[in-house]
Image: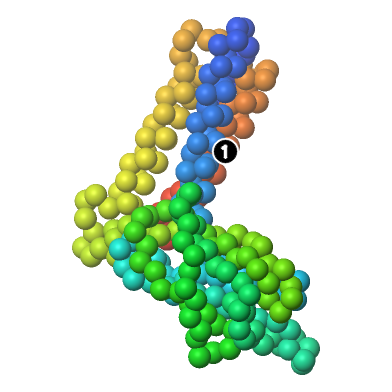
Amino acid sequence: MVFVPIHVKIITCNNEIIAMKVLTLSFVALLFSVSLVTQAFAHTTVEVEQFEIEVGWGIEPPVVGFRNDFVFKITEPDENPGLKVGVKNAFKSMQATAKFGGVTKVLDIGSDPRPGHYFSHVIPTKTGSYSIHLEGEINGTPIDIDIPVEDVESTAVLDFPPTSGSSSDQDVAALKSAVSSLQQEVSSIKSGSGIDVSSEGAAYDYAILGLSIAAAAIILAVIALIKRK
């Protein structure tokens, strides 16, 4: 990647305003790229004292409108060092609640034949972020924790051939829009608005920081889009 040197000289506050715009757009691009990277969340594992709790989807990636399961794996150390054993009857005094935004649903938990493995049938009806709240106790140990699970995606993730309105196309369009806005602000710093430019001042520092963040964000976003295809 080639970086074009940009010279900034502060004569009025306009330089700092433009530089701050670049920095703001760069953070937006970074947040967008991070949201793409973190969509592949897979199972999440947390530890509460001696217990290890793993939560996720039975079928991944989870797709809106298709039957799936929230799956749980709860283990504790075995008598043999280094080994773990499944916890039986883990939900005897513990409740699992699915959360989507401000909507919640208490789950009916079923036991898998394997010790320590549990599940709950569900059909996700909206795309986005879900989490599981566990509350109660396991063999006398208090449990009160939120555990995020992988985001539910639209059917576009499984479409073949892909439709023109797939989520990937929308992500690419949004990324192009962010890059275009960033390029316009860079042009303003380089030669626009009658601003004299050199390499000194806070505006220069803001601009360089912003462009560095933007470059990293674009790379992350491109990698994420490639992995999703």
The quadrant holding residue 52 is bottom right
Residue at position x 52%, y 42% in the image: 31
Instruction: Note whether 129 is above or below 201 in the view shown.
Output: below
Residue 7 placement, left or right of 222: right
The quadrant holding residue 199 is top right
- Quadrant for the C terminus in the image: bottom left
**Closest to the observer, 142 or 128:** 142
Q: Which residue type carries mark 1?
A: Ile
Residue 76 placement, left or right of 26: right
Q: Position of residue 16 (x, y in %)?
A: 60, 17
* SS category of the residue bearing label 1: helix
Q: Position of residue 9 (x, y in %)?
A: 62, 13
Query: In this rendering, does residue 4 appear at all?
Result: no
Query: In this rendering, does residue 210 appear at all?
Result: yes
Instruction: Note whether 76 is above or below 62 in the view shown.
Output: below
How many badges with numbers are in the image? 1
Residue at position x 42%, y 53% in the image: 128
**Closest to the observer, 90 or 115:** 90
Residue 133 placement, left or right of 137: left
How is colour applied across the structure in the image? rainbow
According to the picture, the residue beneath numbered tag 1 turns out to be: 213
Q: Position of residue 122 (x, y in %)?
A: 39, 69
Residue at position x 62%, y 20% in the image: 203
Q: Residues within 10 Å of mark 1 (few under 14, many from 20)?
A: many
The quadrant holding residue 209 is top right
Q: Position of residue 114 (x, y in %)?
A: 54, 89
Instruction: Note whether 100 is above or below 47 in the view shown.
Output: above
Residue at position x 54%, y 36% in the image: 27
